[in-house]
Image (cartoon, rainbow, N blue to C red):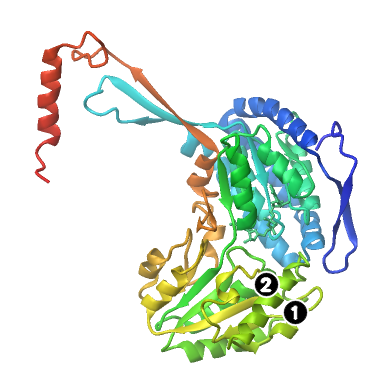
C-alpha cells in the first residue's frame, strides 16, 4: 500500500521451518482498506481507459519482471511457506503463463461482438461487449501464494479492473512483492495495491466499495464472505477447498496412477486445494496399485520432497483425521499418527478407512491419502461424488477416461495425469458445492471480472412497428401468423 496508509499495528510473517521473521507488515484497518479502494477507483478509470492493447503491453512488462526476478520471488515463497524452491518456481511459471494468456486473449474474449438480432427484430444491429467491473477485491490463501491469487488478479487486470489484494497473513511478503513489482511495471497509478492483515482486514475489504470479491480459501471463510458481501449485493467468486478423489480403473496404467496418487497427495505437504485426498481403486487392480503406492510413498520424505506445514494448526487437523481413521478400523501402510510432528508431517497411506470418517469426508490438507477398494467404476463414481466438495478429480483409465470424467461432480477432472487442468490457461478453474462457484482462468475467468453490456442499435424502421401504441390490429394479425409459421409446426 502507498505511504498515505495510517496503519501502525504490525505483524510478522514467519518461516514455518525455523520461526525466523521473514518480514513485518502493517495490519491495515477498515479505514486503510477504504482508502485503498478509493485510490483503486480512480486508478480503475485510467486503467480501463487504456484499452486491451495498452493493458496487455503493461501486463507483459510485469510478466517480464516476474520472469527475470523469479529466483528472488522463489526465495520469498520458500521463506514464507516452507515449500522447496523447485515447487515455488513451478507455481510462478504457471502464473506467468496465465498472465500472458489473459493479456493476449482479453480482447478476443471480452471485446465487442455482433449477435444475431433474430427475425422479428431484423432491423436491429445487436452487439455485446464485456466491460470492466471497476475495483475487484482479491482475498488469497497461503498454500500457492503466487499462482492462486494471480489466477484472479491477472484475469481481473486484463479485463480492465483495478485490484486491491489481501494476501494471507502467512504470506504477506509475497503479496507485497507482487504489488511492488507491478508498480515498477505500471508506475502511473496504483492499479494493483496490497492490504495486509488478518481476517478482519479481509472482512473490511469484503464490506468496502468494491465491485466484486474474488476469494480463495476455506469453505468456512467463503460462507462468511458471501454473507458479508450480500449486505451490498457485491458479487463474489468463491474458490474454496476440496476433497479430491482419484479413480483407478481396471485397465489403468498402474505405475502412472500410483505416481499421480503419490505426487497429488504428498507434494506441497498435501496443502493443495486440488491435491489427491481419496483414491478409489478397482478391485481387479487394488492390491497391485496399493503395493505401488506404498513403495513410492516410502521414498517420499518430509523436509526433502516437501516442506513443513505452513500453518502449524493444520498439524492438529491431520493428527485428528489419522487418529480417528485408525481408531475406526483403518490401517496405515505408510506413516500413521506418529508421523505428525511439531512442524513436519510424514507421508501417510491409509486403507480400510470407513467412508463416513473425517479422513474421507473433511478436507485434511496434509500429506495423507486414503485408498478404498471398489467393485466397479460405478461404485467409484458414486463414492467419489458422495462429498460436500467438488473441486478437482483425477481418473486413470485407458478406455473410459472421458466417460468417467464427465460423471464426476467436480469443476475439473484430469485424465491419466495429475492436476493437469490447473496449468492449462484456456480451461476454467473452480468448483461446485462447498468448493465454491464462479470460475477463474480461461475465457470464463476473464468474463468473471467483467459485466456484459448489450447494445441494440436500430438500423432502419420496420414496416411492422411493434413497440408503439400506434401498433395496428393488422400488425398483430401478421405477427400471429408469422409466429405460427415459424414456431407452430412442432406438435410436441
Ligand atoms: P482461510 O479461509 O483461512 O483464509 C483465506 C483468506 O481469507 C486469508 O487471506 C484470510 O486472512 C482471509 N479471511 C479470513 N477470515 C476472513 C473474513 N471473515 N472475511 C474476509 N477474509 C477473511 O484459508 P487458508 O487457510 O488461507 O487457505 C487454505 C484453504 O484454501 C484450503 O481450504 C484450500 O483448499 C483452499 N484453497 C482453494 C483454492 C481454489 O482455487 N479452490 C486454491 C488454494 C487454496
Q: Is residue 382 above or below residue 224?
A: below
Using the rendered image of the protein, determine whether residue 105 is visible from the camera's viewpoint.
Answer: no
Q: Is residue 302 above or below residue 56?
A: below
Q: Quadrant of residue 33?
A: top right
10 Å neighbourhood of mark 2: few (<14), some, or many (≥20)?
Answer: many
Label 2 CB, ligand 1: below 8 Å? no
Where residue 20 appears, as percent x and y from the top left, is: 90, 63
CA gap between label 2 and label 1 equals: 10 Å
Residue on which disc 2 sits:
366
Q: Horizontal placement of 132 versus 70: left or right?
A: left
User: 306 or 198: nearer the eye?
Assistant: 198
Q: Quadrant of residue 306?
A: bottom right
Q: Is residue 114 above or below residue 82?
A: above
Earlier-in-chain disc, 2 versus 1: 1
Q: Horizontal placement of 230 versus 24: left or right?
A: left
10 Å neighbourhood of mark 1: few (<14), some, or many (≥20)?
Answer: many
Where residue 386 appears, as percent x and y from the top left, is: 46, 69
Q: Quadrant of residue 469?
A: top left
Q: Check contact, mark 2 vs mark 1: CB within 8 A.
A: yes
Label 1 CB, ligand 1: below 8 Å? no
The numbered dot on residue 164 is none
Q: Quadrant of ligand 1?
A: bottom right
Where residue 190 appears, as percent x and y from the top left, is: 74, 32
The numbered dot on residue 340 is 1
- At x 43% / y 63%, what residue is drawn? 409
Using the rendered image of the protein, determine whether residue 247 is visible from the camera's viewpoint.
Answer: yes
- At x 90% / y 40%, what residue is drawn? 8
Amino acid at each position: 500500500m502507498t505511504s498515505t496508509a495510517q496503519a501502525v499495528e504490525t505483524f510478522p510473517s514467519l518461516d514455518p521451518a525455523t520461526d525466523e521473521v521473514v518480514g513485518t507488515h502493517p495490519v491495515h484497518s477498515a479505514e486503510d482498506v477504504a482508502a485503498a479502494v478509493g485510490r483503486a477507483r480512480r486508478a480503475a478509470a485510467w486503467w480501463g481507459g487504456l484499452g486491451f492493447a495498452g493493458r496487455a503491453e503493461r501486463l507483459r512488462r510485469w510478466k517480464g519482471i516476474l520472469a527475470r526476478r523469479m529466483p528472488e520471488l522463489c526465495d520469498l515463497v520458500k521463506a514464507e511457506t516452507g515449500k522447496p524452491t523447485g515447487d515455488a518456481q513451478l507455481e510462478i511459471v504457471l502464473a506467468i503463463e496465465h498472465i500472458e494468456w489473459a493479456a493476449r486473449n482479453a480482447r478476443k474474449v471480452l471485446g465487442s461482438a455482433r449477435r444475431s438480432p433474430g427475425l422479428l427484430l431484423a432491423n436491429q444491429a445487436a452487439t455485446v461487449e464485456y466491460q470492466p467491473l471497476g475495483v475487484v477485491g482479491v482475498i488469497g490463501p497461503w498454500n500457492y501464494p503466487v499462482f492462486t491469487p494471480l489466477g484472479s488478479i491477472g484475469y481481473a487486470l486484463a479485463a480492465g479492473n483495478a485490484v486491491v489484494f489481501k494476501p494471507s497473513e502467512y504470506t504477506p511478503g509475497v503479496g507485497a512483492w507482487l504489488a511492488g513489482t507491478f508498480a515498477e511495471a505500471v508506475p502511473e497509478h496504483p492499479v494493483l495495491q496490497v492490504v495486509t492483515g488478518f481476517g478482519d482486514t479481509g472482512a473490511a475489504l469484503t464490506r468496502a466499495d468494491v465491485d466484486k470479491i474474488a476469494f480463495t480459501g476455506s469453505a468456512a471463510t467463503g460462507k462468511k464472505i458471501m454473507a458479508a458481501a450480500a449486505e451490498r449485493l457485491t458479487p463474489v467468486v468463491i474458490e474454496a477447498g476440496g476433497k479430491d478423489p482419484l479413480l483407478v480403473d481396471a485397465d489403468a496404467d498402474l505405475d502412472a496412477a500410483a505416481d499421480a496418487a503419490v505426487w497429488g497427495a504428498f507434494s506441497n505437504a498435501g496443502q493443495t486445494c486440488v491435491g489427491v485426498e481419496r483414491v478409489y481403486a478397482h478391485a481387479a487392480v487394488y492390491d497391485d496399485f496399493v503395493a505401488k503406492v506404498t513403495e513410492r510413498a516410502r521414498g517420499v520424505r518430509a523436509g526433502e520432497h516437501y516442506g513443513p506445514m505452513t500453518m502449524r494448526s493444520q498439524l492438529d487437523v491431520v493428527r485428528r483425521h489419522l487418529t480417528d481413521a485408525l481408531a475406526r478400523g483403518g490401517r496405515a501402510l505408510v506413516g500413521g499418527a506418529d508421523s505428525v510432528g511439531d512442524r513436519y508431517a510424514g507421508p501417510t497411506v491409509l486403507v480400510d478407512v470407513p467412508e463416513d470418517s473425517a479422513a474421507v469426508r473433511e478436507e485434511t490438507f496434509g500429506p495423507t491419502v486414503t485408498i478404498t477398494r471398489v467393485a466397479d467404476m460405478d461404485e467409484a463414481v458414486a463414492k467419489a461424488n458422495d462429498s460436500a466438495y467438488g473441486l478437482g478429480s483425477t481418473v486413470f483409465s485407458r478406455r473410459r477416461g472421458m466417460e468417467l470424467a464427465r460423471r464426476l461432480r467436480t469443476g475439473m477432472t484430469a485424465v491419466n495425469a495429475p492436476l493437469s487442468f490447473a496449468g492449462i490457461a484456456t480451461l476454467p478453474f473452480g468448483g461446485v458445492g462447498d468448493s465454491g462457484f464462479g470460475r477463474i482462468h480461461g475465457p470464463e475467468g476473464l468474463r468473471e471480472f467483467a459485466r456484459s453490456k448489450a447494445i441494440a442499435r436500430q438500423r432502419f424502421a420496420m414496416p411492422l412497428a411493434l413497440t408503439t401504441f400506434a401498433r395496428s390490429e393488422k400488425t398483430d394479425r401478421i405477427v400471429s401468423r408469422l409466429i405460427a409459421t415459424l414456431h407452430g409446426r412442432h406438435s410436441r
